[in-house]
Image (cartoon, rainbow, N blue to C red):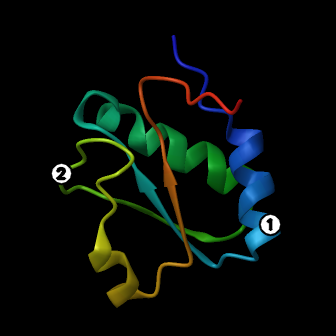
Amino acid sequence: MYDFNLEGAVKEIKAQKAKKVLLHLPDGLKPKAKEIQNELKKKINVEIFIWAGSCYGSCDIPGEAKNIGIDLIIHFGHTKWRYD
């Protein structure tokens, strides 16, 4: 139903040389979080955390992530962003 573009996520993780990655999903997609985490772990050896707090969109970035040493936040949403 959704295309999470996990290959793109892996590419970005590698480009950023991230060691700790946080998955940030809105409530409607949180049931898919563990599946996304497992698929990413198959493709790349990094620590992947799931944000369980609120997420009201890509502008609602969890500032607390810096306190636990997160290198990269990957936000998944319901709607594609357009890059014009």
In-image side of 34 versus 71 (left or right): left
Question: In the rendered image, which quarter is residue 80 located in?
Answer: top right
- For the point 74% across and 58% down, the residue is 12
Q: Nearer the viewer, residue 62 or 46?
A: 62
Residue 19 x/y as whole percent = 64, 79
**Residue lying furthest front:** 84
Specify which label sits upstream in the sequence, 2 or 1. Answer: 1
C-alpha separation, residue under disc 2 versus residue under disc 1 = 27 Å
Q: Nearer the viewer, residue 42 or 20?
A: 20
Residue 15 x/y as whole percent = 81, 67
| Image: 32 above or below 58 | above
Residue 14: image tag = 1
- For the point 68% across and 40% down, the residue is 6
- For the point 40% across and 42% down, the residue is 33
Asked which secondary structure carries label 1, the reply is helix
Residue 42: image tag = none
- For the point 56% across and 47% down, the residue is 38
Residue 29 x/y as whole percent = 34, 31
Quadrant that contains the C terminus: top right
Q: Which residue is mark 2?
A: 54
Query: As shown in the figure, which amino acid type bears the numbered disc 1?
Result: Lys
